[in-house]
Image: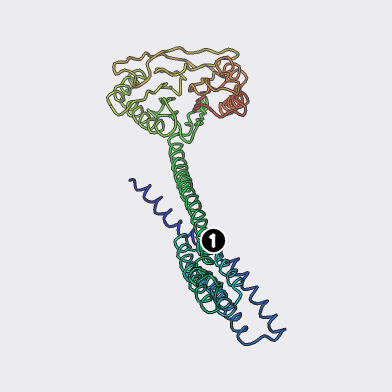
């Protein structure tokens, strides 16, 4: 069992007794408050009518006892308060039953109080559990049976009946009733316990989900730190970038690598899959490409070396599409290579050019070879390097954003500020998508040559 699971179980184990205490307290407090109110009103009536000392003693003792129960509950000793409350209620009813059966020839009033003992059994079951309810029922049945036997022994029975037979005849319905109440209480407690178990399971799931959300938020924050800010180069060049994950973490990434004073490495890549697995692979691929970029001056050789490293790591089971280019920030000449990534798009005045260059994704085959092209950016040109998430975004009718809409959006985007151009393109995708959730990670880098 993992440490996290053990921590969850420990927390639930601590919460369960507290829940039971609160549940018991929520039932005990109104009942006890009702008896306190009734006892106080009874004292007032007795004072007005001038009752005897015995009545004052009984009612006053009940009032003090109920105040004691309330104080124990407020102190958190709810279990003890519930035991005292249940015992005193049951004992008080039993005393009234005994008083009537031992001093009154009419057995009816005594039997009424014997049936009222069901309230004591029910309270014991609700406050203390089913076992206590059955214990109270057994004690009450024995006590009532003895009192009935004593009553029939003192006051006699019918001419054709004996005290034993009369006791059995009178006690059997009462005992059956008390047992039925105990069984009902047991069923109630069993249902309550089952609901509590389901609540604990749900609570554990919520805690696990909350912990997972917290961890994912931390992972997302850490991943965002891997995205470098656009580099400041010279007045003739401006670069903007943005990456938006579809979930908490992303498999897309971009990177800017300072190679020397005038050489800038640009990476845009996409790991297959989403969420945590893709994010972990993204960090590995980023480090691999950075290492290769520091050792080789050819974009094709960088991708070849990165591919060999990833294929040689047998723990890697995902592929990465990647664009890697080396931009001369003085001449605006870009040498680049492509590993299965969407073609970059150049906006020149009022028309677009797709720079077609093929290659297998990284991690597909260890012997893959990569070609290399050179692109010259002219004044006012915009270079769009994007991931396939933008092209494959869809709306509620399952229509893809596609290349046609992408081309229209690029032509309509800001021509002078790459940051504004990204905003315009993002807005076009958002309007197209509507209320549909983002389907895939989206990454976009725009390189702008000054007009």
- In the displayed structure, would residue 91 be above or below residue 449? below
Q: Secondary structure at mark 1?
A: helix
Residue 47 visible, this angle = yes
Across and down, in percent, residue 282 comes to 39, 30
Query: Counting other residues with Cα less than 10 Å from the Cα at mark 1, is it few (<14), some (14-19), or many (20 or more)?
Result: some
Colouring of the image? rainbow
| Residue 397, position as x, y percentages in the image | 60, 20
Would residue 348 appear left or right of 256 to someone viewing this image? Answer: right
- The number of numbered discs placed on residues in the rendered structure image is 1
Q: Nearer the viewer, residue 179 or 445?
A: 179
Residue farthest to the front, as pictured = 160
Q: What residue do we see at 44% from left, 45% from top?
A: 208
In the picture, measured across the screen, residue 187 lies left or right of residue 9, that is right
Q: Nearer the viewer, residue 371 or 157?
A: 157
Q: Residue furthest toward the right?
A: 48
Q: Which residue is mark 1?
A: 177
Quadrant where the image shows the N terminus: top left
Q: Nearer the viewer, residue 35 or 143?
A: 143
In this rendering, does residue 253 appear at all? no
Name the quadrant of the C terminus: top right
In the rendering, at what x and y percent does residue 95 appear? 54, 76
Task: Give x and y (percent) for residue 39.
Answer: 63, 76
Q: Quadrant of residue 123?
A: bottom right
Q: Is residue 324 left or right of residue 26?
A: left
């Amino acid at each position: 069992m993992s440490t996290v699971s053990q921590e969850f179980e420990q927390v639930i184990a601590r919460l369960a007794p507290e829940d039971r205490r609160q549940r018991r307290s929520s039932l005990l407090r109104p009942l006890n408050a009702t008896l306190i109110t009734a006892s106080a009103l009874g004292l007032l009536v007795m004072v007005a009518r001038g009752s005897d000392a015995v009545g004052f003693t009984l009612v006053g003792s009940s009032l003090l006892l109920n105040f004691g129960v309330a104080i124990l509950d407020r102190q958190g000793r709810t279990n003890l308060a519930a035991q005292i409350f249940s015992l005193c209620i049951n004992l008080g009813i039993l005393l009234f039953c005994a008083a009537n059966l031992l001093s009154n020839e009419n057995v009816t009033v005594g039997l009424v109080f014997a049936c009222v003992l069901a309230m004591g059994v029910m309270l014991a079951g609700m406050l203390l559990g089913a076992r206590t309810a059955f214990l109270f029922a057994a004690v009450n049945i024995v006590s009532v049976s003895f009192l009935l036997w004593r009553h029939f022994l003192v006051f006699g029975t019918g001419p054709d009946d004996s005290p034993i037979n009369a006791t059995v005849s009178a006690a059997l319905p009462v005992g059956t009733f008390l047992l039925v109440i105990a069984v009902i209480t047991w069923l109630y407690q069993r249902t309550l316990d089952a609901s509590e178990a389901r609540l604990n399971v749900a609570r554990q799931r919520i805690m696990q989900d909350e912990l997972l959300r917290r961890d994912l938020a931390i992972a997302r924050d850490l991943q965002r730190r891997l995205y470098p800010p656009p580099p400041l180069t010279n007045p003739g060049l401006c670069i903007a970038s943005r990456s938006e994950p579809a979930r908490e973490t992303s498999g897309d990434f971009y990177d800017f690598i300072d190679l020397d004073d005038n050489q800038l490495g640009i990476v845009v890549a996409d790991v297959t899959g989403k969420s945590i697995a893709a994010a972990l692979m993204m960090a590995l691929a980023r480090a691999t490409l950075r290492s290769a970029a520091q050792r080789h001056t050819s974009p094709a050789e960088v991708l070849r070396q990165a591919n060999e490293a990833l294929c040689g790591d047998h723990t890697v089971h995902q592929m990465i599409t990647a664009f890697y280019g080396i931009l001369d920030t003085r001449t605006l000449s870009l040498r680049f290579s492509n590993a299965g990534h969407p073609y970059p798009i150049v906006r020149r005045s009022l028309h677009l050019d797709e720079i077609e260059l093929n290659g297998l994704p990284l991690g597909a085959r260890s012997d893959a070879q990569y070609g290399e092209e050179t692109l010259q950016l002219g004044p006012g040109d915009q270079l769009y390097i994007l991931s396939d998430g933008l092209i494959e975004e869809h709306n509620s009718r399952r229509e893809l954003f596609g290349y046609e809409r992408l081309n229209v959006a690029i032509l309509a985007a800001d021509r002078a500020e790459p940051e504004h151009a990204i905003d315009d393109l993002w807005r076009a995708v958002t309007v197209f998508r509507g209320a549909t959730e983002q389907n895939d990670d989206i990454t976009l880098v725009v390189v702008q040559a000054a007009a």
